[in-house]
Image: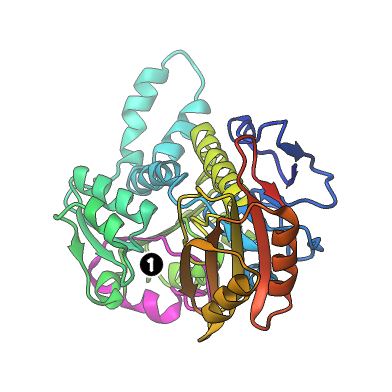
């Protein structure tokens, strides 16, 4: 039986995928095989040796020590695209709020008194006049699941849309309207767009991606939106530009005391994926991905290891996380063959310094498979070895 430890409240639609006869689920589990979480920070968590995989019900993994887990052979999963629609809708709403003082007008009306409210409202509505998005240019930095959806919907609103992403995937490229102009350089977005929204992961290359230099390129009438991670935009640079009238507005989904109480800045309490539908979608995807990995060794949507899939039809499967170096595959196959075990199928994928290999074998002898596992674990460059037994009821981890 697999043991699952949960942090945070995970939607029941996701947790229900773990059958009670095959899984023990407990937030206090001290020796879990899998961990499921949302926003809990795990950088100070002491991971037990039993942990095989960690799945986050969300796209970002900054709350997980990915690099350390990679060295230990622990696979980290996320759920890209599961909350994309929720974030997209919030960004579109924020675009509208940035040109129409809807919130200010609604708050003003609530304070009116007397029997002639309609007349008073009509006489004073001019102070809440705004502008329109139609015909304005939106720059979308990062054309992943979220950025692509925003680009398409902004075009449907009548905006000109320019996107920049040097790493856009083929699958995502097919979903982007041909009317969305692709910028060859990010500077083109900064210099020509009226609205700029950023949708990239946080890493060393994107930390303070938008700072003094980038804001200086923008139109003084431009408005900036950050729904990715707080650290991607330099808030000090934003404040300086806002105060100097070199930036017309800033909307962020990440609370920062320095940004509060400024009429040109709208701060939201991290509402991007906070919809019932997004939480359910993320939970279902995270649970499905972790479950499949534990039961079959298949890796999909991992942030630290390559995607590897192979039909599991043999009596046993061996999964091996190892250094991505020459001759390692030869060592693996030679060791398996030396024990008189026949290989039915084999697949290998590398990603940076690490690689992942699935080996299906026709062997049915449990003791022989355990001996093979011990032999492989003694080999240099092999980080983690598992054997998975194929069964009609469940695949037993050993």
Q: Nearer the viewer, residue 171 or 113?
A: 171
**Can residue 353 be seen by looking at this rendering?**
no
Which of 70/388 is in front? 388
Query: Is 19 on the left or on the right of 88, as rendered?
Result: right
- Give the residue drawn at x 39%, y 41%: 89
**Total tally of numbered discs in the picture:** 1
Quadrant holding the N terminus: top right
Which residue is most to the bottom?
Answer: 326
Magenta span includes 198: yes
Range of the magenta residues?
Answer: 191-217
Q: Is residue 179 above or below residue 122?
A: below
Residue closer to the observer: 335 or 79? 335
Q: Can I make out residue 347 in this image? A: yes
Q: Secondary structure at mark 1?
A: loop
Residue at the left extreme of this rendering? 179
Residue at 53 percent across and 77 percent down: it is: 329
Residue 215 location in percent, x, y?
Answer: 38, 74
Work out whether residue 104 or residue 193 is closer to the camera in this orientation and state it: 193
Q: Residue at x 48, y 64 (%)?
A: 346
Is residue 240 magenta-colored? no
Point out the residue furthest to the front here. 340
Residue at the extreme top: 115
How many neighbours does mark 1 have within 10 angstroms: few (below 14), some (14-19), or many (20 or more)? many
27 relative to 349 in the view: left or right: right
Q: Position of residue 330 (x, y in %)?
A: 53, 80
Quarter containing the C terminus: bottom right
Check the image and report above or below for 26 versus 206: above
- Tell me which colouring the rendered structure shows: rainbow
Q: Which residue is mark 1?
A: 247
**Residue 379 occupies quadrant:** bottom right
Spot occupied by residue 9 in the image (x, y as percentages of width and height): 69, 38
Query: Which x, y percent locates residue 2?
Result: 73, 44
């Amino acid at each position: 039986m697999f043991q699952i430890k949960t942090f945070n409240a995970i939607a029941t639609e996701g947790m229900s995928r773990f059958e009670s006869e095959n899984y023990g689920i407990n937030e206090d589990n001290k020796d879990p095989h899998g961990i499921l979480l949302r926003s809990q920070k795990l950088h100070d968590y002491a991971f037990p040796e039993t942990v095989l995989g960690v799945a986050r019900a969300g796209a970002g993994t900054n709350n997980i020590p990915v690099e350390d887990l990679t060295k230990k052979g622990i696979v980290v999963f996320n759920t890209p695209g599961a909350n994309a629609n929720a974030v997209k809708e919030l960004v579109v709403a924020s675009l509208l709020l940035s040109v129409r003082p809807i919130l200010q007008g609604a708050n003003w009306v609530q304070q009116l008194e007397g029997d002639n409210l309609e007349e008073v409202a009509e006489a004073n509505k001019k102070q809440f006049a705004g502008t329109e998005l139609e015909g304005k240019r939106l720059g979308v930095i990062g054309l992943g699941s979220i950025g692509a959806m925003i680009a398409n919907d902004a075009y449907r609103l009548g905006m000109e849309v320019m996107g920049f992403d040097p790493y856009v995937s083929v699958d995502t490229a097919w979903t982007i309207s041909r009317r969305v102009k692709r910028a060859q350089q990010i500077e083109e977005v900064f210099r020509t767009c009226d609205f700029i929204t950023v949708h990239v992961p946080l890493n060393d290359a994107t930390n303070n991606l938008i700072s003094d230099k980038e804001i200086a390129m923008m139109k003084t009438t431009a408005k900036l939106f950050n729904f990715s991670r707080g650290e991607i935009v330099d808030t000090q640079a934003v404040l300086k530009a806002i105060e100097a009238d070199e930036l017309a507005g800033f909307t962020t989904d990440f609370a920062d005391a320095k940004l509060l109480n400024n009429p040109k800045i709208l701060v939201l309490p991290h509402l991007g994926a906070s919809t019932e539908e997004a939480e359910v979608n993320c939970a279902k995807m995270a649970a499905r991905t972790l479950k499949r990995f534990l039961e079959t060794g298949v890796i999909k949507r991992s942030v630290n290891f390559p995607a590897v899939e192979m039909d599991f039809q043999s009596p046993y499967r061996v999964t091996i996380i190892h250094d991505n170096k020459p001759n390692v595959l030869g060592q693996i196959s030679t060791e398996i063959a030396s024990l008189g075990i026949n290989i039915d199928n084999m697949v290998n994928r590398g990603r940076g310094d690490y690689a992942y290999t699935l080996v299906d074998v026709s062997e049915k002898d449990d003791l022989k498979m355990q001996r093979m596992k011990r032999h492989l674990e003694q080999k240099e460059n092999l980080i983690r070895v598992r054997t998975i037994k194929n069964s009609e009821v469940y695949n037993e981890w050993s």
